[in-house]
Image (spheres, coloured by chain):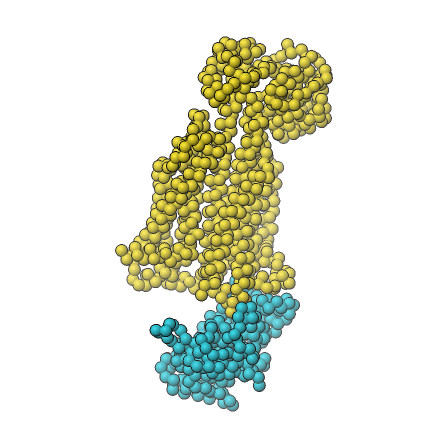
């Protein structure tokens, strides 16, 4: 019982200083619960079965990510508790001198960990349950589902999962703590406060050399990441180099800056610059490992979150563009030249269900391939993309047919002379090469007659509906072309439903199997919307989930380091006060010192991210995703809000620590 | 000679109205320019409280402290900091050097906060380190120095700003006897050659014997006063021991 009282007292005592750690634990639990409870949201939403399927898929994704998140949080808690125990060596020493056995001290520690764990779990879960109500609104908005009724959402599965994961984490922490206590010798414990953290003074010249080497390594890694994306091995190598470079960078940077400033005595010996620089130097030198890990976490956060947001926005923008009709039926069968007659009439689907529709055919011709359209630069392109299917036939459509579709889709119509063609495309990566080729002039050959390009670039447009821009090229030809000698024919029917679209869609989908049996398939606006929204939701949630967890973990570690330093720094600051530095200046020094300490890993992470995002853009381009400013802005907001918040709280707490008597 | 420090009817009480402790009970004395004054007393006698009041680290309950004619008990805010920065120098028992800075930088800090030009800083440090014989440790970190070296670096930091008054709180408290002797000789030199005015608190008779004048404090009051005059240090030391014996109690144990 006495041990229990002691534990409670200890927790209360240290709560003020380490509130930020408890807060992080609580946040971690809450976030874990919220993201694992998403599947329970469907209870309150009226969702179609396709949407439910997507949410299930998303849930599977998030479960996978949760394991990763649990590992990260586990490391955070182990690091933090190791850190907090180190700071309490003196206290344990006193327990031992009072005759307490190691077993009992271990028991105190176990109790403390247990109490903190239980409290943070309970508070976190309460917070999580509240937060997941808001999550319902976000989910509803994303899926554009109407929240017909408000229902209190509670996920038992998520609750159990959270408790089990945290129980495992805390069990490991407890074993770890007991192990640490058993390792201690009394004399070391009592003298611990004298030694403090061993001062690490490094040879400055060595630091400068290591710093310069790290810059070279990072530069090479950036080069590989941007220019050698063709090789997966080299890409992996660039990541390894990036990690190595980051560690070396933090090993050398403080020494480098110190040396740099020292060379200018006017700056070095100005105000308290000497003090600030030396303090930061020693702070970074004692935390090279954690600061590097934090920098990498921040880098991943920025890159993952901004990429996820880019994908989300791209998909959202492309969605309206890519689905101009309610439904599109395509026939692959070479016997069908008219979808209405060849399929719909056969399966008894009444076109009166449509308010309007349009029919057209595209053809494949022997000499109209991907390669033919980029003929002037074919060799260059093949060097970069050796796997490009240059022999694939591009669909060809007569101008009058295309103009019918275009008017139906609400897009521009065109006119053509008898010896001209237009290339229609919207797939960014392909357009780049096609434009290059077109600007040099491309001639194609259909049934022995030559046609040249009317425009020196691709026109934007599509025939096949899709959630993202994926039209690699459609060739529009004059009506005068004889289309009887085609390699294949594809017939299309695009239509809008008449009346209640949801109901009509449900009816139409019932014919799906029969359409397939007749050599056709269909795309509907609703299907594409659901799939795309699902993908967007997965991106947003994974981005947010990982982003927030990474951010709070890294900010928490920095905060703990700064707070424990403030306790040590109290003496230093009181000495400065004695030699006449006023409180205002002291607070400013503290602010600058902690600001730099928080900024350095973020700054390096931002530089990494500039290259990381560029690299991600190159990869995402093939998914026809273009990044934009707003995703960078969203990322910046996230970081400023969370990371900045942690910094401010840390500063205010340490200011209180150094100013109290 | 000019009066640097004047303490008049100083009182400092601790506690509440039920349990009042008079740490300093109506003390008055003065220090002239160029004097090396010691304050002796057992632990708990109030000597450190007195030093804290003079150094403006602690607030007085009643009375006045005039340094160079300025009543420091009336100073507030920025004026107080300016006063501390420019008119006082501190030497502490536990050195209070910043462990992340080299000796040179520790000394320089006292000047940089006064916005002294870097060129002048270098010149002054070279001068003072020659006097205190610490030129060889200027580029070392505190953990690489001996206790005596650390205290001399701390002394250099205290005198480099040419303060009106140097306050030393048990400066030999953490030193071995050889280092103590060396430090005290250096302080004597500073006092004689540079005309530095020093007020030193100690409970050690040997340390006190380097002073020119000693006030003995017991239970918050001045109990006795000794002036070295033309005595040799040995003679002065013997007289100190006599007073200490008279004071009795704890001080004997301290010897």
Count of labels shown? 0
In the rendered image, residue A108, in percent from the top left (x then y), is placed at 32, 55
> Residue A65: in sight, yes or no?
no
Q: Position of residue B248 (x, y in %)?
A: 36, 84
Q: Residue at x 54, y 39 (%)?
A: A306
Q: Along the horizontal axis of the image, is A324 left or right of A508?
A: right
- As displayed, is residue B164 above or below residue A433? below
Q: Is residue A53 above or below residue A159?
A: above
Q: Residue furthest left?
A: A1
| Viewer-proximal residue among A633 and B137 | A633
The chain letter corresponding to yellow is A
Nearest to the observer: residue A206 or residue B2: B2
Answer with the quarter of the image where residue A396 lies: top right
Residue occupying the far bottom of the picture: B230
Residue A20 shown left or right of residue A164 in the figure: right
Q: Position of residue A618 (x, y in %)?
A: 59, 34
Q: The N terminus of chain A is located in which quarter? A: bottom left
Q: Nearer the viewer, residue A43 or A515?
A: A43
Question: Would residue A84 be visible to someone looking at this image?
Answer: yes
Residue ID at (60%, 71%): B125
Measured as percent of width and height from the top left, residue A524 is found at 51, 22
Q: Quadrant location of the C terminus of chain A?
A: bottom left
Residue at image position (54%, 9%) is A341
Q: Tell me the colour chain B is drawn in.
A: cyan
Q: Residue at x 33, y 55 (%)?
A: A8
């Amino acid at each position: 019982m006495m041990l229990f009282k002691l534990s409670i007292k200890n927790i209360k005592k240290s709560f003020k200083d380490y509130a930020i750690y408890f807060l992080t634990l609580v946040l971690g639990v809450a976030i874990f619960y919220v993201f694992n409870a998403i599947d329970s949201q469907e209870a309150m939403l009226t969702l179609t079965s396709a949407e439910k399927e997507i949410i299930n898929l998303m849930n599977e994704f998030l479960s996978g990510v949760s394991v990763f998140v649990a590992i990260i949080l586990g490391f955070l808690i182990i690091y933090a508790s190791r850190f907090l125990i180190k700071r309490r060596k003196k206290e344990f020493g006193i327990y031992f001198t009072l005759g307490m056995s190691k077993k009992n001290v271990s028991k105190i520690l176990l109790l403390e960990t247990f109490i903190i764990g239980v409290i943070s779990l309970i508070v976190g879960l309460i917070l999580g349950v509240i937060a997941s109500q808001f999550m319902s609104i976000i989910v509803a908005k994303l899926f554009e589902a109407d929240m017909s009724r408000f229902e209190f959402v509670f996920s038992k599965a998520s609750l159990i999962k959270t408790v089990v994961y945290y129980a495992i984490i805390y069990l490991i922490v407890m074993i770890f703590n007991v192990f640490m206590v058993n390792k201690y010798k009394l004399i070391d414990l009592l003298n611990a406060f004298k030694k403090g953290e061993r001062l690490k003074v490094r040879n400055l010249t060595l630091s400068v050399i290591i710093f310069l080497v790290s810059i070279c390594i990072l530069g090479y890694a950036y080069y590989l990441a941007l220019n050698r994306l063709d090789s997966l091995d080299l890409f992996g190598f660039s990541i390894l180099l990036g990690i190595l470079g980051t560690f070396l960078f933090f090993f050398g940077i403080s020494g480098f800056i110190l040396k740099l400033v020292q060379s200018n005595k006017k700056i070095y010996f100005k105000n308290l610059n000497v003090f600030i620089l030396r303090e930061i130097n020693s702070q970074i030198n004692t935390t090279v490992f954690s600061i590097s890990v934090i920098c990498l976490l921040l880098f991943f956060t920025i890159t993952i979150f901004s990429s996820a947001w880019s994908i989300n926005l791209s998909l959202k923008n492309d969605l309206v563009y890519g689905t101009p009709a309610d439904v599109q039926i395509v026939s692959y069968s070479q016997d069908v030249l008219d979808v209405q007659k060849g399929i719909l009439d056969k399966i008894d689907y009444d076109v009166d269900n449509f308010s309007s529709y349009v029919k057209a055919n595209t053809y494949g011709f022997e000499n109209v391939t991907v390669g033919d359209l980029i003929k002037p630069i074919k060799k260059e392109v093949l060097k970069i993309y050796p796997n490009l299917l240059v022999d694939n036939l591009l669909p060809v459509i007569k101008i009058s047919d295309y103009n019918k579709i275009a008017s139906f889709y609400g897009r521009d119509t065109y006119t053509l002379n008898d010896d001209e063609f237009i290339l229609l495309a919207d797939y960014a990566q392909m357009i780049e090469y096609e434009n290059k080729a077109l600007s040099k002039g491309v001639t194609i050959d259909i049934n022995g007659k030559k046609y040249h390009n009317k425009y020196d670039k691709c026109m934007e447009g599509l025939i096949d509906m899709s959630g993202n821009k994926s039209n690699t090229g459609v060739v529009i030809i004059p009506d005068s072309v004889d289309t009887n000698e085609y390699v294949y024919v594809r017939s299309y029917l695009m239509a809008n439903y008449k009346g209640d679209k949801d109901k009509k869609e449900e009816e139409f989908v019932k014919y799906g199997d029969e359409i397939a049996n007749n050599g056709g398939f269909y795309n509907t606006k609703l299907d594409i919307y659901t799939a795309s929204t699902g993908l967007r939701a997965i991106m947003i949630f994974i981005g947010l989930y990982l982003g927030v967890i990474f951010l709070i973990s890294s900010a928490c570690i920095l905060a703990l380091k700064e707070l424990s330093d403030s306790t040590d720094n109290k003496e230093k600051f009181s000495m400065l006060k004695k030699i006449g530095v006023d409180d205002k200046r002291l607070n400013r020094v503290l602010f600058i010192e902690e600001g730099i300490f928080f900024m350095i890993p973020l700054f390096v992470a931002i530089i990494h991210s500039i290259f990381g995002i560029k690299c991600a853009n190159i990869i995402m381009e093939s998914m026809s995703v273009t990044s934009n400013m707003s995703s960078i802005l969203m990322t910046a907001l996230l970081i400023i809000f969370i990371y900045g918040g942690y910094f401010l709280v840390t500063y205010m707490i340490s200011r209180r620590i150094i100013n109290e008597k | 000679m000019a009066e640097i420090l004047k303490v008049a009817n100083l009182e400092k009480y601790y506690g509440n109205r039920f349990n009042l402790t008079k740490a300093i009970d109506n003390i008055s004395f003065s220090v002239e320019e160029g004097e090396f004054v010691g304050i002796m007393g057992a632990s708990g006698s109030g000597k450190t409280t007195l030093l804290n009041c003079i150094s403006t680290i602690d607030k007085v309950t009643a009375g006045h402290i005039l340094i160079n004619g300025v009543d420091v008990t009336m100073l507030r805010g920025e004026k107080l900091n300016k006063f501390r920065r420019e008119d006082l120098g501190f030497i502490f028992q536990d050195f209070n050097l910043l462990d992340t800075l080299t000796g040179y930088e520790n000394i320089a800090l006292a000047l940089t906060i006064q916005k002294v030009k870097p060129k002048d800083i270098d010149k002054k440090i070279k001068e003072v380190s020659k006097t205190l014989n610490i030129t060889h440790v200027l580029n070392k970190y505190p953990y690489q120095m001996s206790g005596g070296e650390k205290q001399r670096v701390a002394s250099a930091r205290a005198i480099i700003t040419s303060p009106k008054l140097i306050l030393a709180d048990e400066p030999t408290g953490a030193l071995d006897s050889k280092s103590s002797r060396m430090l005290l000789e250096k302080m004597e030199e500073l006092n004689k050659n540079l005309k530095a005015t020093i007020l030193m608190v100690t409970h050690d008779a040997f340390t006190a014997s380097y002073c020119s004048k000693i006030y003995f404090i017991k239970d918050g009051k001045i109990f006795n006063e000794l002036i070295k005059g033309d005595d040799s240090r040995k003679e002065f030391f013997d007289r100190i021991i006599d007073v200490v014996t008279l004071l009795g109690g704890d001080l004997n144990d301290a010897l």
